Amino acid sequence: YNENINEVIEILKGNSSKILKEIEKKMKELSENMEYERAITYREKIEEIKKIENNQICEYGKYIDEDVFAFEEKERLIFVCILNIREGKIINKHSFHVEKKIEEEDIFERVFTMYYDTKTIPKHIILKNIYSEKESILKEWIKIEKGTVSEIHYPIINSRRKELLDMAYTNLNDDIKKQLFQESI
């Protein structure tokens, strides 16, 4: 019991990789000793910890005010997933898709500005690196239309923002799969 409590505390502190290594070691030992049923419980524990890691990236700083904006075009559809982070916590997820009516070059800017037209702009916006060329256009729109300034980040190395961006794209890909599956029925 105490071992489980200590594991939970370590996971909440963000030290899950250490716990995962220990559990994987125990699982391997059990498998080698042909204690397969007990090994399965450790495997399930590993899967649960990985789920927690993927779904609960949370920064405890009070001054974090940012959105993660994930965007993907698939065939005739445009998919968007936005994670709203306020006071260091993911407070909301907006997912939607729209049908692309015509081919246009600035579809990303149009969707971005349509979303934020009725929303408050956060201090920081996280985007995929491929949209870095759009930064001046987006910042100018934010300044003119919203009268504020936002920093735009394009994380490419492992960091809190990169993990959030990966989480947003994981959610976005799940939404894409669901939609395409529903259409195939």
Image (cartoon, grey):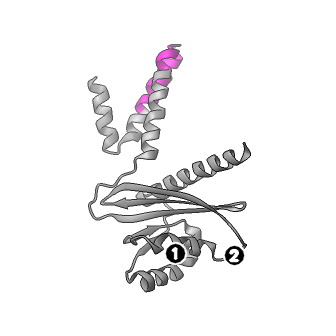
Question: What's the distance in space between the residues labelled 2 and 1, CA to CA?
Answer: 15 Å
Name the kind of residue labelled 2 in the image.
Glu
Quadrant housing the C terminus: top right
Whether the residues at callouts 2 and 1 have beta carbons within 8 Å, the answer is: no
* In the image, residue 150 lies in the stretch drawn in magenta: no
The image shows residue 63 at horizontal and vertical percentages of 28, 65
Label 2: element kind: loop
Q: The disc labelled 1 sits on which kind of residue?
A: Thr
Q: Residue at 36%, 72% (x, y): give it.
A: 123
| In this rendering, position of residue 76 left or right of residue 40 | right
Residues drawn in magenta = 22-39
Q: Please tell me which residue is depicted at 48% across the width and 28% down the height of the picture.
A: 44
Q: Residue at x 52, y 16 (%)?
A: 36
Can you see residue 160? yes
Say which mark, if any, is on residue 113.
Answer: 1
Q: Residues within 10 Å of mark 1 (few under 14, many from 20)?
A: some
| Res. 158 visible in picture | no
Q: Is residue 69 above or below residue 13?
A: below
Is 180 or 53 nearer to us in this picture? 180
88 or 37: nearer the viewer: 88
Which residue is at a point 49% across and 52% down the rendered structure image? 167
Q: In this figure, which residue is indicated by the disc labeled 2?
A: 104
| Secondary structure state at the residue bearing disc 1 | helix
